[in-house]
Amino acid sequence: MFKRVLLVLVMAAVTTSVFAAKDKNSIQVKGSDTMVNLGQAWAEKYMEKDSSNFVAVTGGGSGTGLSSLISGTCDIAMSSRNIKEKEIALAKQKGINPTEIKVALDGLVVVVNPNNPVSSLTTDQLAAIFTGKITNWKELGGKDGKIVLLSREVNSGTHVYFKEHVLRKNDPTSKEEFAPNALMLSSSQAIADEVAGNPSAIGYYGMGYISKKQKPLSIARDEKSGYETPTIENVISGTYPISRPLFLYTNGAPEGLVKKLIDFALSKEGQEIVLATDFVPVNR
């Protein structure tokens, strides 16, 4: 009984400390792995300007960030997808009012090993690959070999976006799912590392993770459209088919240090950091 009471008191103390942080000098930012490097860059630069404040940034996925905001264990949630209706309903039950702020744009990059001869695919081909209808690279003009599917785990906003916009082709009635043999990895970096070492692998992640160790594919909306590369210019123009907004969520209108950090993220300097980390600014 004593241990149970102690645990309740500790949990209450943690929750209280997070909410109290709005009036103090430290905040917790949690969520999207796609955004974690961007969030850390914002935090570091902000703290250089104001060393009296502390901003802690951690990943875990968009769903994790939004769950933390709803439970009161973070002050800002980073998300690469819109909050869901069921999350809003749960938040309201707990007295939380999720407020959405769009802070950047992102192109989702589909990558293969540099030794893979395949360089371009249509979104229909991508859907067929990740649902398991196409299983061998030779079906796509590549070498004879089984395709190794890499995906973010289900709690990831990147996973949700790819499923809804590529596998299900923006059709709310579609029930398409990732193939059962798809490997669900915990981070974008894990996908990048696996693709770098596996000539048969294909995966996806945000533009900020592109490196010379992977080959980004050019993507076409359909067979009649041109193939577009995942560049900032093509995301801004809307010609690259797989792009999305990135959000920060707060409990109600931002206040105190939360507001200061978000104002910085949307400032000219903050949006230059967006560009420097290979995302697309919303304010130019």
Image (cartoon, grey):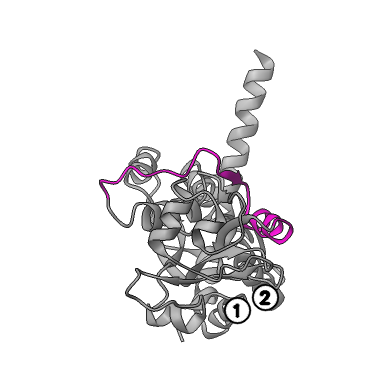
228 vs 274, left or right, is left
The reply to whether residue 282 is in sight is no
Q: Amino acid at mark 2?
A: Lys
Circle nearer the N terminus (2, 1): 2
Name the residue rendered at 57%, 67% in the picture. Answer: 118
Q: Is residue 112 magenta?
A: no
First to last magenta residue range? 172-198
Name the residue rendered at 43%, 59% in the picture. Answer: 125
Mark 2, residue position: 45
Cα–Cα gap, marks 2 and 1: 9 Å
Q: Is residue 178 magenta?
A: yes
Name the residue rendered at 40%, 57% in the picture. Answer: 166
Vertically, is 243 above or below 14? below
Mark 1, residue position: 273
Give whichever of 283, 3 is nearer the camera. Answer: 283
Count neighbours of disc 2 (C-alpha within 10 A) and say few if under 14, some if 14 to 19, many if 20 or more: some
Please, what secondary structure does the residue beneath circle 1 have?
A: helix
Vertically, is 228 above or below 198? below
Q: Position of residue 50 (x, y in %)?
A: 67, 74
Q: Amino acid at mark 1?
A: Ile
257 vs 164, left or right, is right
Q: Which quarter of the figure has residue 11?
A: top right
Vertically, is 121 above or below 283? above
Give whichever of 197, 3 is nearer the camera. Answer: 197
Q: Position of residue 174 (x, y in %)?
A: 29, 46
Q: Position of residue 228 (x, y in %)?
A: 45, 78
Would you say the residues marked 2 and 1 are in contact, meaning their CB atoms lie under 8 Å apart? yes
